[in-house]
Image (cartoon, rainbow, N blue to C red):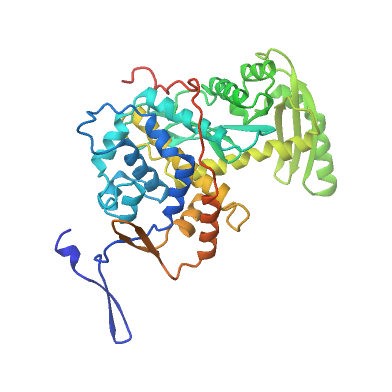
Amino acid sequence: MTQCSRKPLTFSSLSRRRVEADFDGGHLTSDGGALLLREVDRRLGLTDRLAACIDDRRDPFTVTHTVAAMLRQRLFGLALGYEDLNDHHTLRHDPLLQVLAERAPEPPYGPPTLSRLENAALRRDLARMAETFVKTFIASHRSRPEELVLDFDATDDLLHGAQEGRFFHGYYDGYCYLPLYVFAGEQLLVAYLRPANIDAAKHSRAILKLLVRRFRQAWPEVRIVVRADSGFCRWRWMRWCDRHGVDYILGLAQNTRVAALAQPLADEAARRFEATAAKQRLFGEVAYAAGTWDRARRVLVKAEHLAQGPNTRFVVTSIEGDPQDLYDRLYCARGEMENRIKEQQLDLFAGRTSCHRFLANQFRLLLASAAYVLLQTLRQEGLAGTQMAHAQAGTIRTRLLKIGARLCVSVRRVVLHLASGYPWQRLFRHVLGRLRRLPRLALNKSTRLFQAPRPAAGFR
């Protein structure tokens, strides 16, 4: 620290008294609530399992920076809102981060060391890390689920450099990656980085096959439903689902042929709107097969007419039931997945793919995914039944994790004196009590689930 930085900071006076500040407070932290995340990680064993996925090719007799400790430092940093490696220049001296990384009282690692970790990961390491999320999801169930609804979606990850796999995407009007996400409810299963010069459904059918096989190994009788927008409506997808007993409900893009089949329902909605001047929503179904499909399938029709004009939507499904109920209750619920992706992108910095190497950026995406798993488990297990049961990741961070504290470390104890004026003390105690009652997960070894992600042709 330079001499200049030690000068007191002067603020507006309080009556006749001067108001000054400095950065010489000692062993203080602004992230005292991160101990809750540490409890979650201890129950899941997530960072230890992710660390075991990475082949450490360094000389074990000279290693002082363990992979597990570096992963903890990076994951907890992301969960606490520190997205850049440069933040760890000074953050590594935070006494609580030293505890989280299990390095106390020694400081954890600086940006160069963490950068080497990100760039050292191989494809097989990333494949094993990706499998860990699915294993953790399965082990987190205390009883066999009756049904799993798998949400598939792609999103844009805008780039601002010359990263490997950088392509221009016309729909998003920029250079980007096109990561694929799979969720089951709010629980993340897959975060798979892809270049943007591909179809949105690329590799999704292969991932679906692997997920279905793994879930049926664990739960042979579970019903599986796949839900996605029109970008994933491919006949090979649907044919595979038909042959393997997997239900689907997928958006269907408009075209002249299916619009003609639904025209009588759309005309009726228009007539009712003209008569009442109120929004009209009518539901029906038609049998439709595109020219490339292997057979006709059931298509739900939502014929909606608004003051702005018609708004007709189509959904293809293998599920029996009332069209309106399927559309409103089941298909529209996929919008919740978009909120989870926004949490990943905005609150946990999954879009911070600024490394040059494609594989290093996939590693960063998996780090952000792991941070999401920690926060989601905190929300699901610790905050259930409270006023924050459905809080966004950013709100959880602000209210539960960002607590001022003074840290005292001795030979026998590590004590955090949390701020006395913290307004959610009762909630904090409640969450800790619930987390301490969680059993530690035991994950069984299994056959390899995922192949490692590969960049576009020509990458190193």
Position of 30 relative to 203 (above/below): below
Could you tell me which quadrant the N terminus lies in? bottom left
Residue 261 can be seen in this image: yes
Q: Residue at x 23, y 34 (%)?
A: 63
Position of 171 relative to 336 (above/below): above
Residue 311 can be seen in this image: no
Name the spot of residue 206 as percent of width and height, x first: 54, 19
Name of the residue lying farthest toward the left: 3
Q: Residue at x 34, y 25 (%)?
A: 122
Position of 207 relative to 281 (above/below): above
Q: State left or right for residue 77 relative to residue 249.
A: left
Q: Residue at x 26, y 44 (%)?
A: 109
Could you tell me which quadrant the C terminus lies in? top left
Q: Nearer the viewer, residue 359 or 31?
A: 31
Name the spot of residue 96 as percent of width and height, x first: 34, 55
Q: Quadrant of residue 298?
A: top right
Q: Quadrant of residue 22?
A: bottom left
Position of 104 relative to 212 (above/below): below
Name the spot of residue 368 as percent of width and height, x first: 43, 40
Name the spot of residue 418 as percent of width and height, x first: 41, 64
